[in-house]
Amino acid sequence: LVVRLLGWVNGTPMSSAKLLPLESLADAGRFLGRMSQVLSELDTTELVAAKRFHQWDGKNTMGVKDFVGYIQDPRRKALVVSVLEAFQRDLIDSKEAESFPTSIIHGDFNDANMLVDSNFLVSGVIDFGDSVESWRILDLSV
């Protein structure tokens, strides 16, 4: 996916703020909602890059099962296995995930990729390198 910067967005990464007012988090949620809505309106028919395999795409969660053997703590390993089993059973095997709306997602909406202005309100988002076409709900999981 190629994104062209059309203008400079002033701001500093939200992650650099020592303290944030609660309103900043609410504003980040509103911003993600608006951005998600706009991205969902894109026609992805010819956006081949958006359809690529990306390990960080949450719908590819089962790809981590090959690494479970490297977890040494038995309790942590059991926890990871139980989450993977639930993901497979409840979303994939049940075909529930097939009903999830899909669109282009940012894929990495976190405080290091949100810019805030001097009032700690979101002024922009950076780092679209993890953007793919996937389940819209996944942007909330990051």
Image (tube, rainbow, N blue to C red):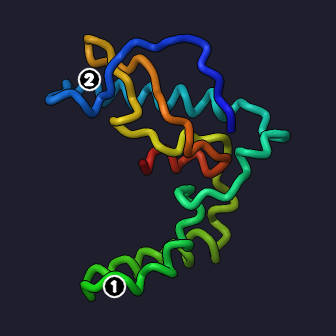
Which quarter of the figure has residue 83?
A: bottom left
68 left or right of 48 in image: left
Residue 102, image x, y percentages = 67, 47
Q: Earlier in the sequence, mark 1 or mark 2?
A: 2
Q: Is mark 1 in CB contact (under 8 Å) with mark 2? A: no
User: Which residue is located at x 41 percent, y 17 percent?
Assistant: 123
Query: Callout 1, which amino acid?
Result: Ala
In the displayed structure, 120 sits above or below 107; it is: above
Q: Residues within 10 Å of mark 2 (few under 14, many from 20)?
A: few
Which residue appears at 71% of the width and 53% of the height?
52
Image quadrant where residue 117 sits: top left
Mark 2 residue type: Glu
Left or right: where 114 falls relative to 20: right
Q: Which residue is denoted by mark 2 in the rendering?
A: 23
| Residue 29 in picture, x, y percent from top left | 40, 32
Given this view, does label 1 or label 2 mark the residue nearer the observer? 1
Image: 79 above or below 74 = above
- State the image quarter where residue 48 is shown: top right
The residue tagged with tag 2: helix, strand or loop?
Answer: helix
Quadrant of the image containing the N terminus:
top right
For label 1, the residue is: 78
How many marks on residues? 2
**Residue 119's spot in the image, x, y percent?**
26, 12
Vertical order, 54 against 95 (above or below): above
Q: How far apart are the alpha carbons under marks 1 and 2?
A: 38 Å
In the image, what residue occupies the spot 46% across and 27% down? Answer: 125
Name the secondary structure under disc 1: helix
Q: Position of residue 77 (x, y in %)?
A: 33, 83
